[in-house]
Amino acid sequence: MSAYEPMSFHLASDRLILQPWAETDAEALCALHAERGDGKPTVEEARKIIADGLAFTAASGIATLPIRRRVENDFIGYCGLIVGRATIDEPEIAYELFQRVHGNGYATEAARAVLDAATATGRRRLWSTVRTWNTASFRVLDKLGFERDHTTTDDRGELVWLTRTLP
């Protein structure tokens, strides 16, 4: 049993709705992963990613959630909390959005909703790790009050660790 309340899995902002994954999100997740430029998972692989994520959510009380625009009701990416390179006590905030919606403030809006959800769990600190080339992510995290903590290097290059204390 976690020392923390589970995060809310139904979040909303002025323009966005974040709610749990469904198997029907698999094709959109494939397309989103394809934009990374390192291959496209099959629909079956995406369904497994979703199923594994739902199982992790049930066990941990944290999740990434699909992001949909309220008006268009279209899947534009995901945002949420992960263990990633951090811990269950101090998880990472993670987000990934389709390139076609970059520059509209959606990542900041979704991440702000997730930040509020993380605060409501009783956690005291979040992390984020960002590749040095990802200027847009640094802008989002700066708007949310994250500060650079340290830099590490892995097989893909430099990684900047940012942190934010929660109220």
Image: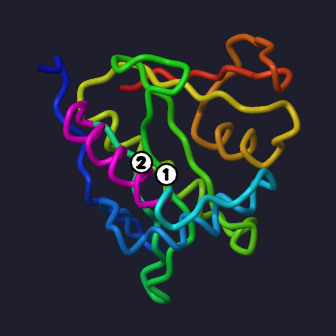
Residue appearing at x 40%, y 66% in the figure? 13
Q: Residues within 10 Å of mark 1 (few under 14, many from 20)?
A: many
Q: Which portion, as a residue range, is magenta?
A: 46-61
Q: Position of residue 113 (x, y in %)?
A: 41, 52
Task: Give the mark nearest the N terminus, 2 or 1.
Answer: 2
Instruction: Check if mark 2's residue and mark 1's residue have beta carbons within 8 Å.
Output: yes
Instruction: Give the image quarter of residue 89.
Output: top left
Q: Main secondary structure of the magenta part?
A: helix
Q: CA distance from mark 2 to mark 1?
A: 5 Å
Q: Position of residue 59 (x, y in %)?
A: 21, 32
Picture disc at residue 139: none
Which secondary structure lies at badge 2?
strand
Residue appearing at x 35%, y 44% in the figure? 52
Picture disc at residue 64: 2
Residue appearing at x 23%, y 36% in the figure? 61
Q: Position of residue 161 (x, y in %)?
A: 67, 20
Q: Looking at the picture, tell me which residue is in the foreground, 50 or 67.
A: 50
Q: In the figure, 149 relative to 59: above or below?
A: above
Residue to which mark 1 is pinned: 79
Q: Is residue 10 left or right of residue 116?
A: left
On the rendered image, what quadrant is the C terminus found in? top left
Q: Amino acid at mark 1?
A: Cys
Q: In the figure, 39 relative to 144: above or below?
A: below
